[in-house]
Image (spheres, rainbow, N blue to C red):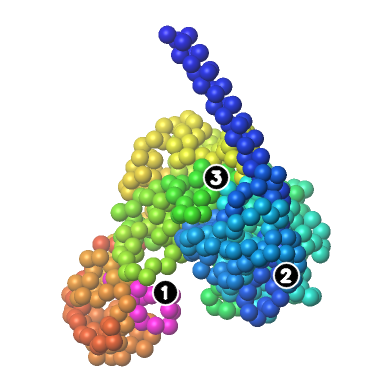
Amino acid sequence: MKTLLRSLSIHFYLTVCLLAGFTVVAGQERSLGSITYRLSMSRPQSHLFEVAIEVEMPESLPDSLDFQMAKWSPGRYAVFDFAKNVQEVRAATGICEPATICDKVRPVTRIDDQTWRVLTMNSRTLMFTYKVFGNDLSGTFSQLDKRHANFNGGSVFMYIVDHKSDPVKLVINPPSGWRIINGRMAQAGQREWQFPNWDTMIDTPTEIAPDWVSEEFVVQGKRYYVMVHSFGDEGGKRASLVRDIQKIVRAETDMWGPPEFDSYTFLLHFADDGHSGDGMEHLTSTQIIQPGVLADDDTYEGALGTVAHEFFHVWNVKRLRPVELGPWDFTRPAKTRSLWIAEGLTNYYGHLMLARAGIWDEERFLSREGETINNIENAPGSRLMSAEESSLSAPFIDRAQSSQRTNMSNTAISYYPKGELLGLVLDLLIRGRTNGRKSLDDVMRRMYEEFYLNSANDTYYLRGRGYRPEDFQRVVSEVAGVDFNDFFAMHVRSVAMPPYDEALNYVGLHLVRQRVTDHDSGIRLNDRNPGATVIGNVINGSAAEDAGLQPGDEILNINGKKVSDRSDLDALDRFKQGERVPISFKRDGRTLRTTLLLKPMDRFEYRIEEKPDETAAQKALRAAWLKG
């Protein structure tokens, strides 16, 4: 029986290999002759990017080609439907200049919300053109105006259905005097690029402007470029910014080892508009947008924090990646249980690397982690949504817009801070239970080696293969030599509070819990409108909920005194627990009144402190953790 089963297994294995080989060959036979993207921006003030896709057909002509705009883009998992900004779609046979008339116009049929179909009609060449409106400076969208052009490929370039894996060429025609920079530059003044596939092309955000500046440095033989595009005062801080970025790069490469690229580009924008802020990871670059000016201390600190996070993504998520993250199906939202690893652990390491780089001291780092514990453990959704469920809910959480009112502020938790705390606890548990012989650093390096460096390519997109949540759980236990299955069952797939006390004790720290006895109205204002007194959320079970207040209500008066800005809500702090406070508010154009019966909320304040009786061994373990 064993011999028969072994023979059948071998036969099945050979059959799978043959089929796999046939699939690759068939895919190659179906490849188009060539695909060239041409990007122009003849009228920047119109905010319209002009795209032309030139296609040369293979010997075996397809009856039609479908051109499709992605619904979302990698790194930001909410569905934004980029097709809503597409206009003036045209097609013609022949390859010609965009401003001229090609041989024969071909009809274009829009077959759904994101797809346009063109009949080839035995043509050997095809020109497909359209325009895309873009006026948002972010890591997801694109912006074109008189100052600059900044594009993220997923929001600008359609792909040809079933041909995302084909090689593509990109040609950029910038306005006169504008210079181009991205993470794939081989030389100054470059205007043409070859990419192995569409996915890699859209992974290359690009800035085009007359006035950006670039600095560079070398770490472990790799060259790093820091592009700074400032729309406001720099305060003479650019040189120190570059030096601090170099410290971060050195700290992170010390942990991971030298990255596989030869060069990497930081694209930093200081927008000075009060609202544009983002950070997005890419294979050989990152795009970081700050809403303030470089001269401002908080903006400077914010930029460094984002750099530490995004550069860690060079390894975690861009190369070491969940199996669902690349290549992607852009016709529907992504679904993965592993964003708490991909993003949450990156959040943890981003803060830890600021300490290891010497930019933060120990007190600053521990204070930051204590704030995260305080926010997460007091969040209503923390006891309702697990880290894995939060990951699956990314299309609803990751800056998603909703026209309907939801209760997610009370039921959901972000995988960023939730994963950060799981990373903190997991790291210290591994260090403590192995007496400092192993750490989460070792787990991450082992994952990178097993799934990226040493695995056969399982798709056209990138080296190696993706991992599943069970793979990460297995590697944690294998590296530590300790069974961590219960940890994942209780704290990753369920909502039990992580064992902070055990974890922190290993490094001579403890978590101080102090019950909050003051009352809490349960009113949370809408952060998207900082100057207004519009309620963004009402905590379940709070005095505000009991009084009938709801999100969208605008607070007008408290105890007869006019409320003109959010600082006036501090008046509630002057009342005592159990007191009744009359409030007037506006809802649906009507002024209404209610009464708050102030009561305490079941909340604690958390902070991390040194243990007064910590041992030398605990101090040494903490030093190894913070220094790497």
Three-letter code, disc 2: Ile
What range is drawn magenta here?
A: 522-536
Residue at 69%, 64% in the rendered image? 104
Q: How many marks?
A: 3
Between disc 1 and disc 2, the foreground one is: 2
Three-letter code, disc 3: Arg
Nearest to N terminus: mark 2 or mark 3? 2
Q: Alpha-carbon distance for marks 3 and 1?
A: 32 Å
Residue at 51%, 21% in the rendered image? 12
Between disc 2 and disc 3, the foreground one is: 2
Q: Is residue 271 left or right of residue 171?
A: left
Residue 617 visible in the picture: no
Label 3 belongs to which residue?
321
Label 2 belongs to which residue?
101
Provide residue 488's location: percent of width, then percent of height.
39, 40
Residue 181 against residue 343 in the figure, above or below: below
Label 2: how many Cα within 10 Å (few below 14, some 14–19, many 20+): few
Three-letter code, disc 1: Asp
Nearest to N terminus: mark 1 or mark 2? 2
Residue 427 against residue 170 in the figure, above or below: above
Which of 21 and 409 lies nearest the eye of the viewer?
21
Label 1 belongs to which residue?
527
Label 3: how many Cα within 10 Å (few below 14, some 14–19, many 20+): many
Q: Is residue 325 left or right of residue 183?
A: left
Q: Tell me the element at label 2.
A: loop
Q: Are marks 3 and 1 in contact (CB under 8 Å)?
A: no
Nearest to N terminus: mark 3 or mark 1? 3
Q: Alpha-carbon distance for marks 2 and 3?
A: 45 Å
Q: Main secondary structure of the magenta part?
A: loop
